Amino acid sequence: MKIAGIVLAGGQSSRYGQPKMFESFAGQPLYKHSLNALQKNQLQPLIIATNSSLQPKFEKEKVRFMIEKQPHQGPLFALQNIMTDLPDVEWFFVIASDMPFMNADFVQTMLTFINDRYDAIVPKQASRLQPLAALYRRSALPKANQLVQQNKRSMKVLIEQLQVCYVPFEDESSTFININYQQDWPQNKNKGV
């Protein structure tokens, strides 16, 4: 069974003011933390979903780049494009590029929940779902196609239409911290603490 690892890195970073995925955290560009978590679990193929203006800024990686046909359409459009372009992949592990504490242990834990009964495996904290650190099965593609055709962009709307395994995580878990604004960085940004 093929499981692809996808780093979503095509956003405008409008709230941040510049492309945040290239900001340095603990000595590496921010997107690398998500990429490394997938890489360490031997997911193949590894894909960075981005747009043509951002692609040249990524370091040379052993990854495939999926360039958005229409930039800035959001994660649902990116997932639908990737699923359509990779017909031989069964599961797609999607991680946003703005999660500094993303790690291989989290990815490994999530992979243990793969089961044919589900279309998606989504982390759930008491207060919120984490659809951009989740697994989506090929069986979710018809629903994704339908939503894209209706110009709907919400991952939450997709999840509501799928058979989902919700994996509980504590609200305090740092794994899901994401950076939207400059002031979201931890105090000791360069130390990675």
Image (cartoon, rainbow, N blue to C red):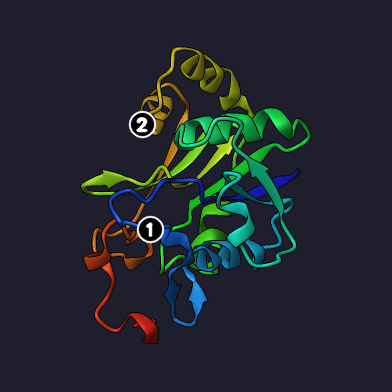
Residue 26 picture location, percent across and down: 44, 81
Q: Which residue reaches farthest bottom? A: 191
Quadrant where the C terminus sits is bottom left
Pointer 2 residue: 156
In the rendered image, the vertical position of residue 30 relative to residue 91, given as above or below: below
Considering depth in this image, is 147 or 165 the residue closer to the camera?
Answer: 147
Determine the residue positioned at 55% across, 52% down: 54
- When asked about the image quadrant of residue 184, the answer is bottom left
* Callout 2 amino acid: Lys
Quadrant in which residue 40 is drawn: bottom right
Q: Residue at x 62, y 53 (%)?
A: 55
Which of disc 2 and disc 1 is earlier in sequence? 1
Q: Quadrant of residue 57?
A: bottom right
Element at label 2 = helix
Q: Quadrant for the N terminus, please.
A: top right
Give the percent coordinates (x, y) of residue 150: 44, 12
Q: Residues within 10 Å of mark 1 (few under 14, many from 20)?
A: few
Residue 2: mark: none
Q: Which residue is mark 1?
A: 18
Up/down of 185 relative to 91, above or below: below
Q: Position of residue 104 (x, y in %)?
A: 55, 67
How far apart are the two marked residues, 1 and 2, measured between alpha carbons? 26 Å
